[in-house]
Amino acid sequence: MFVIYTGPVRKSWSDTIEAHRRAVRTATLETTAALVAEHGLASVTMSQIAEETGIGRATLYKYFSDVQSILLAWHERQIAEHLDTLANVRDRVHEPIKCIDAVFEAFALMAYRRHSAELPAFLHHAGHVARTQRELAAFIAGLIAEAASTGDLRNDVAAEELAEYCVHALSAAGTLESPAAVRRLVRVTVAGLRPEPTADQR
């Protein structure tokens, strides 16, 4: 007598397929970003990506239509990972001003460990950099508002405006030459958020 197994086998098969899809997607994103960083955007082709990853071209085209769509997906993943990292940093530090310091340093170091200049230029043209900056600014604005409510940071400028200033300032870490320079940039940026001294303090 034959026994037909349904639920468990079907779930296992489904999980295997999903794991395979994740593996293909991850390999494609990481390989493409590395190839663009090494050779430049114009030099990378779908055939090259397929060869480097060991994924058939037909399979690759089932997931992505071209190199640009792969890079956009890579950037989407980077955004999510960076925001998760910054949220974890925030959650580990409970004092508002120390939280600002820790999150700013983590963000600046992310910018410092940049990929090739060509990739950010492409993403900027595609509108993804602007959207990323808006998401980061909203996240940072919440931290600034909390620190301002305790008197640690200035409250004469809207938290949203200060957050925009901070995102642009800290993004400059991508042009710096050392982690020490990155940390100096963080200190200068945080200093700009401090309350204006009162007449008695001058």
Image: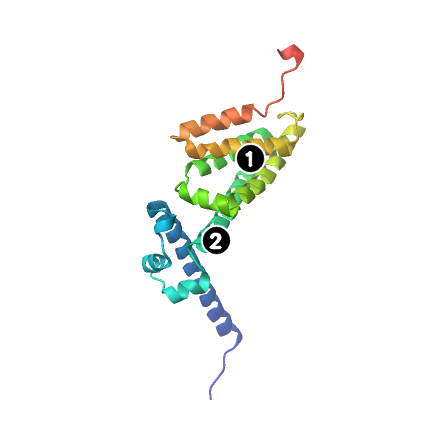
In which quadrant of the rendered view does residue 181 lie? top left
Residue 95 visible in the snapshot: no
Drawn side of residue 53 relative to residue 62, left or right: left
Mark whose residue sits in front, 2 or 1: 2
- Locate residue 140, reporting x and y percent: 58, 36
Question: Residue sitting at 45 percent across and 28 percent down?
Answer: 183
- On the image, numbered disc 2 is attached to which residue? 73
Percent across and percent down for residue 185 are 47, 27
**Residue at 50% from the left image edge and 48% from the top image edge:** 126
C-alpha span from label 2 to label 1: 31 Å
Task: Please give left or right for residue 187 compared with residue 113 in the image.
Answer: right
Mark positioned earlier in the residue sequence (2 or 1): 2
The residue lying toward the viewer, choosing from 94 and 57, is 57
Label 1: element kind: loop
- Which amino acid is tagged 2? Ala
The residue that label 1 is drawn on is 93
